[in-house]
Image (cartoon, helix red, strand yellow):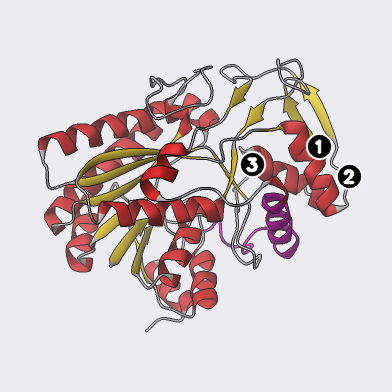
């Protein structure tokens, strides 16, 4: 199968691209490199020994997007491309609606023009809002507490209405929880620009000495140690969930939704303690005020994915931390020092050594 992956040079995208290649799929990657580096794809090619068709395209460039998909003729699309920082979405909501929602609309138009109607969408547990009914199941009422979450919710609703209006579409909405970890080789992993928005990469940067301490938002929740509890899932398990969903869609039409999580939560202090054990480094932290909108606990019920996809998370917190620490040690400053500079098409071709 020829699978086109938007945002394929990013964190989750690169791990999924590697697994797709290892399973024998032909892969095209579409990325604008606004929050990623072509180095990740070079390393994926090196790890797999296989080739990737790489296209520098922004989803907001309608003409180039349509031309690329019509030329590529993919059988299916896995859609990761999107902005994802909650705080930034609050300060720049229109940027998020334009990039995430309008970008997805453009992608759907291009897919239709190319005759491709199989889509795996990267949604999020943020669509459950502030629900305290745990564990979270796919039927839990949806809401959103910030513009980022609303873009995911709007796209889910848009895809549901598209599927209802045209029975030719096969769509998966994958609601995943907190992706962490890295490939076991340490060659690809999470490389956030600037200050990390998520806990695990921040803790890793404290352990490696790039940052002084971790700010723990709230120490008085009704949890065993007073800190927030989240469902962390290894990025390799998450990538495998996308392949399982893709396989399901090959034999089914309509719109489907699955949670991708472990079904168990770990607290902030448990994550910090795990990093201390694995790295042998001190990880300083400070308890600060809670953040508006944070809930005490959030974890999935992944049973539907197990029953329908034959998928379940295999890796525990210790392995998540071990793999993340290996990546951080081997890449203390991320991929390359110049990865924040947006490459030209010619530079990408030269960088990957392609004809």
Which badge, 2 or 3, is on the more N-terminal residue? 3
The residue that label 1 is drawn on is 213
The span from disc 1 to disc 3 (Cα, nearest Å) is 13 Å
48 in relation to 168, above or below: below
The residue that label 2 is drawn on is 282
Magenta span of residues? 319-341
The span from disc 2 to disc 3 (Cα, nearest Å) is 19 Å
Q: Secondary structure at mark 2?
A: loop
Residue for point 72% across, 65% down: 330
Residue for point 67% across, 38% down: 199
Q: Nearer the viewer, mark 2 or mark 3?
A: 2
Pick whichever, 117 or 337, lies toward us.
117
**Left of 67 or right of it: where is 304?**
right
Q: Nearer the viewer, mark 1 or mark 2?
A: 2
Q: Is residue 335 one of those drawn in magenta?
A: yes
248 in relation to 349, above or below: above
Q: Measuring from the top left, give residue 213's x and y in whole percent.
A: 81, 37
Which badge, 1 or 3, is on the more N-terminal residue? 3
Q: Is residue 170 one of those drawn in magenta?
A: no
Q: In the rendering, which numbered label is found on residue 47?
A: none
The residue that label 3 is drawn on is 196
42 in relation to 59, above or below: below
Count of numbered circles on the image: 3
Q: Measuring from the top left, give residue 25's x and y in whole percent.
A: 35, 70
Q: Measuring from the top left, give residue 159's x and y in whole percent.
A: 24, 37
């Amino acid at each position: 199968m020829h699978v086109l992956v938007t945002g394929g040079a990013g964190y989750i995208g690169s791990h999924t691209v590697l697994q797709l290649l290892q399973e024998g799929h032909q892969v095209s990657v579409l990325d604008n490199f606004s929050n990623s580096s072509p180095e990740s794809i070079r390393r994926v090619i090196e790890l797999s020994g296989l080739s990737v068709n790489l296209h520098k395209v922004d989803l907001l460039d309608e003409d180039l997007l349509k031309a690329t998909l019509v030329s590529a003729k993919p059988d299916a699309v896995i859609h990761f491309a999107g902005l994802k920082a909650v705080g930034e979405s609050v300060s720049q909501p229109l940027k998020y609606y334009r990039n995430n929602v309008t970008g997805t609309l453009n992608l759907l138009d291009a897919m239709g023009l190319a005759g491709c109607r199989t889509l795996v969408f990267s949604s999020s547990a943020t669509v459950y809002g502030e629900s305290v009914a745990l564990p979270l199941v796919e039927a839990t009422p949806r809401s959103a507490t910030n513009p980022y979450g609303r873009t995911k919710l709007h796209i889910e609703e848009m895809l549901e209405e598209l599927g209802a209006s045209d029975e030719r579409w096969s769509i998966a909405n994958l609601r995943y929880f907190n992706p962490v970890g890295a490939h076991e080789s340490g060659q690809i992993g999470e490389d956030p620009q600037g200050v990390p928005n998520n806990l695990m990469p921040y803790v890793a940067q404290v352990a490696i000495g790039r940052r002084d301490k971790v700010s723990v938002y709230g120490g008085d929740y009704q949890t065993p140690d007073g800190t927030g509890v989240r469902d962390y899932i290894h990025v390799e398990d998450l990538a495998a969930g996308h392949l399982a969903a893709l396989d399901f869609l090959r034999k089914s039409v309509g719109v489907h939704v699955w949670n991708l999580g472990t079904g168990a939560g770990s607290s902030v202090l448990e994550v910090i303690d795990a990093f201390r054990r694995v790295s042998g480094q001190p990880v300083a932290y400070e308890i600060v005020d809670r953040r508006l909108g944070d809930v005490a606990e959030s974890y999935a019920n992944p049973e539907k994915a197990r029953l329908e996809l034959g998928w379940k998370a295999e890796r525990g917190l210790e392995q998540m931390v071990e793999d993340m620490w290996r990546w951080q040690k081997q890449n203390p400053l991320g991929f390359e020092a110049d990865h924040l500079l947006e490459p030209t098409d010619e530079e990408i071709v030269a960088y990957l050594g392609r004809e």
